[in-house]
Image (cartoon, rainbow, N blue to C red):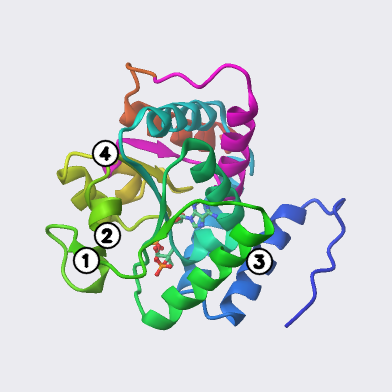
Amino acid sequence: MSKFTADISHPRYNSLLNRHKLEVAANKGMLANSAMIAHGRGEAFDYLLGEVTTSNAKHATTNALAHLMAGKRPIITINGNTAALAGKELLQIAEAIECPVEINIFYRTEERIASILKYLEQLKQQHNITTEILGVNPDAKIPGLEGPRADCCSNGILSSDVVLVPLEDGDRCEALVRMGKTVIVVDLNPMSRSAKMASITIVDEITRVTGNMIDMLEQENPPEIDVNFVNAANLQQSVNVIAARYM
Ligand code: PTJ
């Protein structure tokens, strides 16, 4: 496996670092075969957005965090890509808002679950995190989905009221919305089905989102729910940012 050698002054440092994190995770067996394709699609949209957190994305992040903090049974789900890119930060956010995380992968194999679990347990130890990790022994199904992608935990996703599902598949996002949950998606593509289906879509790169959430959690004033938030308008703002950059 190649060693990460890029200099922090490199203009594409973060992009190169994220690619390296995925390379390492792939070697550990954490990722789906199509993980790099999904990441490449994300990178393409990030390039169009200017590789920065736009003001509407920041607002969506604030609103999402406020909903998670106000939830009765919030949950943060972690798949292969998000474990690799932002596993530590997602665990830290869950610790701060006192909710569990659930490993919830689209291309489910027991080998991948075990590999992701091992990685997250190591992060917990290294960073003194006590957050519970669910998802290893699913005992429930997300209604309306077929096969292993429906698997979930009754004390996790199934009974949650607010669910953060970064880089989620459109079908599963739709099924969670049908269950009446507040579904928060992170997706760089403002036109994806997940982005359109979710209650709140953060059109931003997952490592920037988790960094922003951690900054917000460290601030004195807690984030506030925006009762007037309209997700379609938020998505349109991201599309407008892209259009304005290339006109
Ligand atoms: O670990 P698994 O089995 O759950 O599989 C995870 C992937 C991501 C492979 C799986 O969920 C998948 O195939 O996802 P999709 O349907 O390709 O959707 C991924 C979406 O995430 C795309 O719309 C990308 O634009 C977006 N995306 C990719 N990388 C990032 C991202 N959004 C934010 N930050 C990223 N780093």
Point out which mark residue 1 bears. Answer: none
**Neighbourhood count class around disc 3 (C-alpha, 10 Å): few under 14, some 14–19, many 20 upward:** some
Disc on the earlier residue, 2 or 4: 2
Point out which mark residue 21 bears. Answer: 3
Vertical arrangement, residue 115 with respect to residue 86, above or below:
below
Look at label 1 and name its amino acid: Asp
The residue at the point 27 percent across, 60 percent down is: 153
The residue at the point 46 percent across, 77 percent down is: 114
Foreground disc of the pair 1, 4: 1
Disc on the earlier residue, 2 or 3: 3
Foreground disc of the pair 4, 3: 4
Vertical arrangement, residue 193 with respect to residue 118, above or below:
above
Disc 2 + disc 1, Cβ < 8 Å: yes
Tell me, yes or no, whether the highlighted magenta stretch contains residue 102.
no
Residue under label 1, please give it: 139
Residue under label 4, please give it: 161
Q: Position of residue 144 (x, y in %)?
A: 12, 59
**Neighbourhood count class around disc 4 (C-alpha, 10 Å): few under 14, some 14–19, many 20 upward:** many
Q: Position of residue 23 (x, y in %)?
A: 64, 74
| Residue extent of the magenta highlight | 197-225
Residue under label 2, please give it: 153
Q: Position of residue 214 (x, y in %)?
A: 61, 37
Is 159 or 86 nearer to us in this picture?
A: 159
Vertical arrangement, residue 178 with respect to residue 226, above or below:
below
The residue at the point 49 percent across, 27 percent down is: 62
Mark 1 element type: loop
Disc on the earlier residue, 1 or 4: 1
Q: State which quadrant residue 147 falls in.
A: bottom left
**Where's ligand 1: which quadrant?**
bottom left
